[in-house]
Structures are given as C-alpha cells and as structure tokens.
Amino acid sequence: MYISLIIPVYNRPQETEELLASLTLQTRTDFEVVLVEDGSAPELSSEGVADAYRDRLSIRYVWQPNGGPAAARNTGAAHASGDFFIIMDSDCIVPADYFAKVYDALAGGNIEFFGGPDSAGEDFSPLQKAVSYSMTSLFTTGGIRGNRRSIGRFSPRSFNLGISRRLFERVGGFSDMRIGEDIDFSLRVVATGARAFFLPEAVVCHKRRTSMKLFFKQVFVFGTARVNLNIRHPRSRKAVYMLPALFTLGSAALTLAAIVWNPLLAIAFLAAALLWRYGGIGTAGGAFLILFSVLYGPWWYYLPFCALMLLWFVDAMQRYHSARIGWLAVWTSFIQLYGYGLGYLYGTWQRRIRKRDEAYTYRVTKFFSQKTR
C-alpha cells in the first residue's frame, strides 16, 4: 500500500510551508504529497514552497484555475499515484507519528474509509485553542467532528480524511457542492455501504481561524451548508443539527423579554455590538456585558447564561490548563452556536421558504476567501 496525501491550497504559502515542514519529521516516509494550487494569486503561490521541499519530500505540485476545494481535491486524486488517499487542509500540522499510526491501522486491510480528529497544537495562540475547543467540545458541537462521546454519527471531514482509490473512484470523487462538500462526500461514500471508521490516534493539529469575526463567518456558512445537505441527503437530517438554531432563537426571545423587563439592558447589548465592531468582546467587553446583565437583569435571564458560561470556562480551562483560554472559549462557544444557528436559519429561509436554489445561498459568502476556506 502506498499513500498519496492530497492538499488543496489557496493563497496560503506560509501555512503550506508549516504543513510541509511537519511532514519532513514523519517517522514513516513512504508517502507522496500532491499539492494542488487552486488559482492562488501569483504573489501568494505555494509553488516556491513546494520547490524548497523537493529534496526532503516526494512532492508533486499541480496548478489549476480557481474552482474551489472540491475540484482541487479531485484534481489531486487524478495526479496521485497511491492506492490510498489522505485528504487534508493546508492549515493543518501533522504530528510526527501520524503516518505510522495510519499505516498500522490500515494494515489489516478492512479499512477503506476513515477520518481522524483535529486538535490544537501546543504552539497555537490562545484564540486558536479556544476556537478549537468550541469546534470539538461535546458541550458545543456535540463532538460530531471526531469524539468518542459524539452524540451524532461520525462523518470524516476534509481536514483529516482517508479513502482508498477504488472507493474514491466508485463515488466519482467530490461533487460540485461549494460549501459542506466534505460532508456530502462522506454521506455519498457511506451510501455505497462502506463503513466510516474513526481513528482517534490519527490526530492532526488544525490552525482554524485567527480572529473571532472570521470564525463567525466560517460557522455561519457551515450552518447554511447544513440546510443544503439536508435537501441533498434527506436521510441525514437530525435534530442535533437544529440545536444551534433553536439556541439562537431561544436566546433572542429570552433577551427580548429581559429588555422589556428592564430597558436599561439595551445599553449593555449596544455596548456589546460596539465592542464586537472594534474587537473587544472577548476581553474587558465580555466582563462588562456579564456584570451589566447580572446587576440589571432578572435572575431568570442571567442564571442560565452564567451556568453555561461557567461550564465552558471550566471545561476549556481543564483541557488547556489556562484561565485565559477558558475565558476566550466562552466567547468562541457563543460565536460557534450563534453563527451556525443564524446560518441554519438563513439557509432555511432561502431554501425552504423562498424556494431558492442552492447556488443562491452562496451569495452571502462573498467573504468566502482564503480566510474562511
């Protein structure tokens, strides 16, 4: 067996360099790297990065006009020589024993499709670790992105996905879906009767977003994509995917009731909006919002929110042994739930009520650039 690692890249030479550097440290080196440049700007091309690693990695660089990550992965598969593919995002860093663990898992010959978890690296920034927490915690996403205690069925994602060439070709590769294409791919693979294995040891470090605003945009489009996935794959609809939308609606109703109870609370939310605009909601601004709500809001308003925030804070602090990361995780968790929930509601409005087609929902993703891919 020989593995081809397929990596689409768009305007990310620095992250590509970090990923390739981690691959040079692998304890098992019998793999090739297929790097697909998806129409990046010339000044942000990764071709020079690939050339710099040719003496240390078996690397193949392919350029294509911009067609999105799904098309780039299909191009990578067409140029790969391995009989097993691993698909990974360019903003990942690979632990040194990753390929050794994958080869060990595949040695039995009964795994044709797998996914592994993602986590934060030790050298990641506090915000990146907080974002990682909110995307992987059982108390935010239900652990559906790769957790032994997941409350939903595991679907391999494109940041860490393995599939045999035979099975990849059988399903015809990735579809033309612009966002959520990796979940669409997993659902189509499983529909063939293949089993999706979860390899908890095959973990990668995923850098994710670098600001709360970009993180909000990312989870918003994820929420919109879920509605499109439900329409493409009606059997995949699960109540768990509606929970962020229900949380968003419930929070809005509770907040409105609290403002009616005491109109002074509107000042706190106006301040929060301004702090969001100028980037302070995760620090002193967050403390102000909590204090104002406790002082001027009814107990039935602030008690459930404070209990949830305490849960996130303690859980994230224990995971990363840092009160600062725990504090940031409170706000990234709110962003994860509200962003996804609003995206789901937007997608429902456009697809279910206005009867728009899938392509129409992508109009809201003009910000879907190298920072949100």
Image: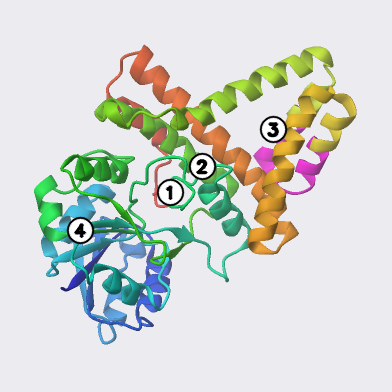
Residue corresponding to mark 2: 141
Q: In the rendered view, tell whether residue 211 sits above or below residue 245.
A: below
Of all residues shown, which one is farthest toward the bottom? 55
Mark in front: 1 vs 4: 4
Q: Mark 1 points at which residue?
A: 145
Name the front one of labels 2 and 4. 4
- Residue 128 is labelled as none
Left or right, 290 with reference to 8: right
Q: Do the residues labelled 2 and 3 touch (CB within 8 Å)?
A: no
* Observer-nearest of 182 and 349: 182
Q: Would you call the spot at circle 3 few (<14 residues within 10 Å), some (14-19), or many (20 or more)?
A: some
Magenta residue check for 17: no
Whether residue 279 is visible here, answered yes or no, is no
* Residue at 69 percent of width and 64 percent of height: 321
- State the image coordinates of residue 260 (x, y, percent, origin top left): 78, 12
Classify residue 16 by image quadrant.
bottom left
Tell me, yes or no, whether the highlighted magenta stretch contains residue 281: yes
Name the kind of residue labelled 1 in the image. Arg
Distance from the alpha carbon under mark 2 to that under mark 3: 25 Å
> In which quadrant will I find the N terminus?
bottom left
Q: Where are the magenta residues, as a range?
A: 270-289
Label tally: 4
Residues at circles 1 and 2 in contact by the CB criterion of under 8 Å: yes
Can you identify the residue that label 3 sits on?
273
The answer to which of 10 and 301 lies nearer the viewer is 301
Image location of residue 320, percent across then percent down? 65, 62
Amino acid at pointer 4: Glu
